Image (cartoon, grey):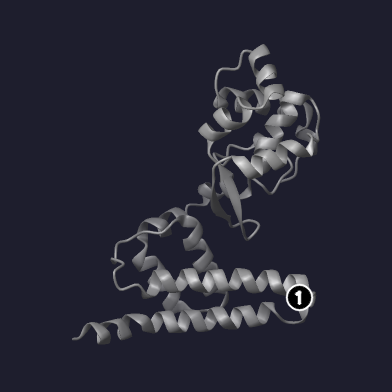
């Protein structure tokens, strides 16, 4: 069998899956989302999803055992499930067994995927350092619930991060690097560094722990599930 023929056979689930993706997008673009800003946002997300799906399903150089992240697996699985595309669901589980096993581990979703779905992710056991998580730490250091906007802007513009898909809120979010946070943010900004030195905090994880203890006493009654 020629490579071209082989690609044609392996691409059939892709055509079906992408067709369902387009149909799903059309459904989202209906009357429920009649505002222009909403339609534009959904359209851009849908295009990204279709592109990523095409990359994973149609690339002939991708091995059968190659894995994707759990976030991408859940993204594809959710869309295929909503379109009742059994072939795509089976292909996802067969092709990405490790991601599939992790995705269906319910305990995995108790913190990571909901870390930014509450006011105080610092109170969860998540290992994702989102923007709100960092702002919680700043609030602890400064003793105020709403730290100055300048800290948020500095964080967004200067600190290394990776984008992860938060399945709970159905969008990508930033996960900041802990070493970069400690060295280039908390140790770089004079006001924060001075407070940390006065409290004799030695590293980022000790800082996170102290912030968590602070919020558990002060703001725990106000956190959202």
- Residue assigned mark 1: 33
Q: Quadrant of the N terminus?
A: bottom left
Numbered disc 1: secondary structure: helix
- Where does the image place residue 102, in percent across and percent down from the top left? 44, 53
Judge whether 44 appears above or below 193 on screen: below
Q: Is residue 130 visible?
A: no
Look at 63% across and 48% down and name the residue there: 114
Left or right of 147: which side holds 97? left
Residue situated in front as seen by the camera: 149 or 110: 149
Q: Quadrant of residue 55?
A: bottom left
Look at 78% across and 27% down and name the residue there: 218
- Where does the image place residue 122, in percent across and percent down from the top left? 66, 35
Left or right of 86: which side holds 203? right
Residue situated in front as seen by the camera: 86 or 185: 185
Q: Quadrant of residue 217?
A: top right
Residue situated in front as seen by the camera: 27 or 221: 27
Q: Quadrant of residue 28?
A: bottom right
């Amino acid at each position: 069998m020629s490579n071209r023929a082989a690609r044609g056979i392996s691409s059939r689930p892709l055509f079906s899956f992408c067709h369902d993706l387009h149909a799903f997008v059309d459904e989202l673009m209906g009357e429920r989302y009649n505002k222009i800003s909403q339609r534009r946002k959904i359209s851009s997300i849908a295009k990204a999803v279709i592109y990523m799906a095409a990359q994973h399903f149609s690339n002939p150089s991708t091995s059968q055992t190659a894995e994707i992240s759990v976030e991408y697996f859940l993204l594809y699985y959710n869309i295929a499930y909503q379109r009742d595309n059994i072939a795509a669901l089976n292909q996802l589980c067969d092709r990405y067994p490790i991601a599939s096993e992790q995705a269906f581990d319910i305990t995995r979703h108790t913190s990571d995927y909901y870390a930014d779905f509450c006011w105080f992710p610092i109170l969860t056991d998540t290992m994702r350092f989102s923007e709100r998580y960092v702002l919680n730490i700043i609030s602890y250091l400064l003793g105020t619930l709403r730290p100055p906007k300048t800290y948020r802007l500095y964080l967004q513009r200067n600190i290394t991060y990776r984008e992860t898909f938060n399945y709970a809120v159905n969008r990508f979010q930033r996960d900041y690097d802990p070493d970069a946070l400690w060295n280039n943010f908390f140790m770089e900004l004079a006001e924060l560094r001075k407070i940390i030195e006065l409290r004799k905090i030695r590293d980022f994880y000790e800082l996170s722990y102290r912030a968590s203890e602070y919020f558990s006493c002060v703001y725990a009654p106000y956190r959202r599930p």
